[in-house]
Amino acid sequence: MTRHSPGEAASAAPAPAVPTLAGLSEVAARHDLILCDVWGVLHDGTNGHRAAGEALIRFRALPGERPRRVVLVSNAPRPWAGVQRILDGYGVPREAYDAVLTSGDLTRDLIAERPGARIYHLGPERDAGIFAGLDLALVAAAAADLVVCTGLFDDTRETAADYRDGLAALRARAVPMICANPDLVVERDKQLIPCAGLLAAAYAEIGGAVIYAGKPYRPVYEAALARAASLDGIGAPDRARVLAVGDALRTDIAGARAFGIPSLLVARGIHAEELGVAAEQARLGDIADWLSRQAIRPDAVIERLIW
């Protein structure tokens, strides 16, 4: 043990440098399973990223003691099949992944634990599929005993401030909220679009009870590893050989760190503006200073997911 004389502070060891990868191939052989984010990695809400899908296909083809697997883990507030249809539309090949797990799937599980619940759906109609086939009644906010938040009604112009009065009314009746998408924002057309996580944070701030379904919370990682284990019947790989890939420090990277698995941050996502790569022609430079100011750091950074 190092001892210091009275009044002498121990100097903190510098944090190890975070490497910037040219491609996934630099670390692929170290991993048996990739838990891959969707929005921000495989598409940007407007365009699919072909190279990302190709990188995952090449990962899955690597030889090894066990099959290499990819589970897509998304905070999308809809069941996995809906996300798969979106990926099909963006041209992401199904050969790039083995399974899809969404916060919508976890939300459905939470609702199923409350049969007959009177639910107020706080979110756009396009997310209504999250309730299909479940034992519940969709009601107005004033009659609800549970609110399920999938997002803002109009995420192109509204903010959390527009929901202040409605959230206060729910809080006054102590109505719990399930947040079906913990993301605060996503990127769409180079713009950051508010998500359900913003409303959930506003509700929690006034004392509302919130249950989060999705990243960065532990249950989604447990479910993802269980899904991976079911693919081959040989159990989940050691956590050291699982890699979480995503574009958000708050969800993808923080969640991976808390669960004890390595992480890879994709720079061209919601942090693109901060990292100076919002413009298509821009190239990722030295980001050591930016990383030093973050509470959570990834194990590696890549400009975009490529092989």
Image (cartoon, rainbow, N blue to C red):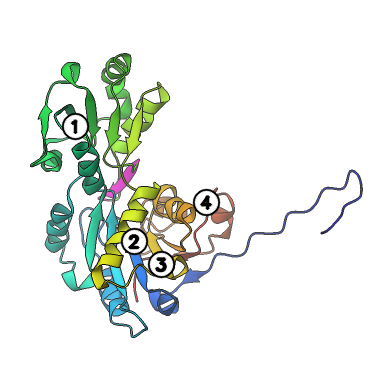
Question: Looking at numbered disc 2 in the image, what kind of residue is underneath it?
Answer: Leu
Residue located at (21% from left, 33% from top): 114
Task: Of the two numbered discs 1 and 3 on the same chain, state the one appearing first in sequence.
Answer: 1
> Magenta stretch: residue 190 in it?
no
Q: Is residue 272 above or below residue 29?
A: above
Kindly identify which residue carries mark 3.
242
Tag 3 secondary structure:
strand
Q: Residue furthest bottom?
A: 63
Q: CA distance from mark 4 to mark 1?
A: 31 Å
Mark 3 Cα-neighbour bin, 10 Å: few <14, some 14–19, many ≥20: many
| Residues at circles 3 and 2 in contact by the CB criterion of under 8 Å | yes
Q: Quadrant of the N terminus?
A: bottom right
Q: Nearer the viewer, mark 3 or mark 2?
A: 2
Residue located at (14% from left, 29% from top): 116
Kindly identify which residue carries mark 4.
296
Q: Nearer the viewer, mark 2 or mark 4?
A: 2
Question: Looking at numbered disc 4 in the image, what kind of residue is underneath it?
Answer: Ile
| Left or right side of 12 for 187 | left
Q: Is residue 273 above or below residue 140?
A: below
Q: Which residues are magenta?
A: 184-189
